[in-house]
Amino acid sequence: MAKVKKAWFCQNCGAQHSQWMGQCSRCHEWNTLVEEVLSKPDSKAVQSGRSALPERKSPTPIRSIAYDQTVRSGTNDNELDRVLGGGIVPGSLILLGGEPGIGKSTLMLQMALRYNSSVLYVSGEESDHQVRMRAERIGIQNDECFILTETRTQHIFQHADNMQPTLVVVDSIQTLHSEALDASPGSVSQIRECAAEFLHFAKTTGIPVVLIGHITKEGSLAGPKVLEHMVDVVLQFEGDRHHIYRLLRGQKNRFGSTSELGIYEMRGEGLREVPNPSEVLLSNGNEHLSGTAIAVMVEGVRPMLVEIQALVSTAVYGTPQRSSTGFDVKRLNMLLAVLEKRCGFRLGAKDVFLNVTGGIKVDDPAIDLAVVAAILSSDQDMPIHHSICFAGEVGLAGEIRPSSRIDHRVNEAAKLGFERMLISKSAQLEKVPNGIAVAKVGKVEDVVRDLFG
C-alpha cells in the first residue's frame, strides 16, 4: 500500500511546507496555506502517466540539431497567429487565461473547428452535447475535430497516443486529475503535476498542447506561479463583458514577441476578427461635440486610433471627483495639475470624468495630448474638428515629448482620412503622407492656441 503523507501548499506561490504556518516563508502572504493529502505513486500509476523519466540522452552539439524556421502551423485565425508570432510551434505548451465568461472556450473551440488537421478537444467542464451546441453556433469546418469529455490525464494520454492528433486543447487545467496524486482537482499540487505531465507529453511527442486556465479575483492565473514558468506561451484574453470587443495579449512567448495584440468582436455566431480596429473604435457620427478628441496609439507594433471623451463640470460636492475608464487615474491627476500650473486653467474645483471608448484599456503615454485636448474642449465647451487627431506625451513642465513609431501613427491617421495631426516638434518624421498636414507643437500652451485661439 502506498505511503500516505500530508503537506501544506501555498495557494499563491505553490511553495510546500511540512506544517501549517500563518505566513508563507517564500512569498510572505498570510493565510494562504492549505492542507493536501499526498500519496507516493506506485509503479502502475507512474507507467500509466507521463511522470516517468524520459530515456537518457547524450549531449548534442548545437550545430548538429535540426532546425527549420518555417515549422510553425497556422490556425486560420490571423489575430491568434499574430499574437503567437506566426503560428503554433510543434511541441509547445500554451496557456490561455481569462475571466469567466469572457470567451476562452469559444476562442479555442473556434480555432479547433477551423484547424487544417486533426484536433483533440478535451473538455472537463462541459458534456459532449454542450460542446456540440456551441460548435453548431460557430460553424463546423473541420471534420477531424474530436471531442473527449475526460478529466483523468492518464486516459487523455492513452487516447492521444491512439489518435496521434496534430493539436490538443484542454479545457481546463483546473478540472484535470492525475492518478499520481491523491489531491483534489484544482489544488496547487494537482495543477502543477498535470501541467508537468502535459509538458512531458508535448516535448516527447512533438504535439502542441493548449491549456485553458482560470484566473483569480486579482486577475492572475489560478494555481502556482511555477505554472507560468513551465509553459512556453502565456496568453491573456481580456475585455469587458458589457462590451463586444475582446483583446488577446501575449504575456510570455518563447517563440515570438509579446508586444502583439489581437482584437476580436463577440457575436452570436462566435468571435469575429477585427483586422482594422481603428474603424470600429471611432464613432461614425458627424456631430461636433465638445470633450471629444482622437488619439493615435500604438499597441505593440500595431497603430490604432481611439476616441477619448472628457466631461468637465462644476463640483456639486465639496471634493471634486476624478474618474477615468480605460486610463490611469493617477496620470489623469498629473495632466490636470500640468494644465492648472502651466496653462492657468482652474480645474481644481471641477469634476473631471474621462472615458476611452470601446471598453479597452490604454497605457500608451502618447495619448496624453488627446486627453489634454478633450479636457480643454469640455471645459471651454468648444468642439474639436473631427478631422484632427493627436499623438504626443505631456511632461511635468508642460512640454510635448515625442512618441515612438511616429511614422506608423501618421500613416494610420492618413489612411483613415484625417486631415491634420498634432505631434511633438521634437519628433523625427521621415515622410508626411499625402492628404494629411502635420502640426508640430512644443508646449501645452501651443496646443491651446492652435485649437481654441
Image (spheres, rainbow, N blue to C red):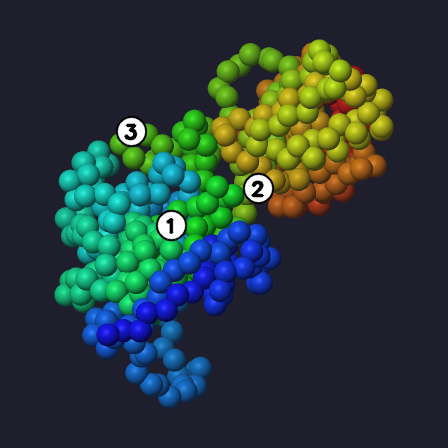
Q: Which element is circle 1 on?
A: strand
Mark nearest the camera among 2 and 1 is: 1
- Who comes first in sequence, dot 2 or dot 3? 3
Q: Is residue 441 above or below residue 451?
A: below
Image point 80% across, 37% down: which residue? Answer: 396
Q: Which element is circle 2 on?
A: strand
| Residue 195 visible in the snapshot | no
Q: Is residue 333 left or right of residue 54?
A: right
Mark nearest the camera among 3 and 1 is: 1
Residue behind mark 3: 268
- Who comes first in sequence, dot 2 or dot 1? 1
Image point 45% across, 62% down: which residue? Answer: 8
Q: Nearer the viewer, residue 273 or 325?
A: 325
Q: Is residue 310 above or below residue 129?
A: above
* Callout 2 amino acid: Val
For mark 1, does the 10 Å Cα neighbourhood hold few (<14), some (14 to 19), or many (20 or more) residues?
many
For mark 2, does the 10 Å Cα neighbourhood hold few (<14), some (14 to 19), or many (20 or more) residues?
many
Q: Which element is circle 3 on?
A: loop
Q: Is residue 444 above or below residue 51?
A: above
Q: Position of residue 39 (x, y in %)?
A: 32, 69
Q: Nearer the viewer, residue 424 or 293?
A: 293
Residue behind mark 1: 213
Distance of label 2 from label 3 (alpha carbons): 29 Å
The quadrant where residue 209 appears: bottom left
Q: Identify the image quadrant of the C terminus.
A: top right
Q: Position of residue 420 (x, y in %)?
A: 64, 27
* Callout 1 amino acid: Gly
Image point 73% across, 19% down: which residue? Answer: 320
Dot 2 and dot 3 residues touching (CB under 8 Å): no
Residue behind mark 2: 298
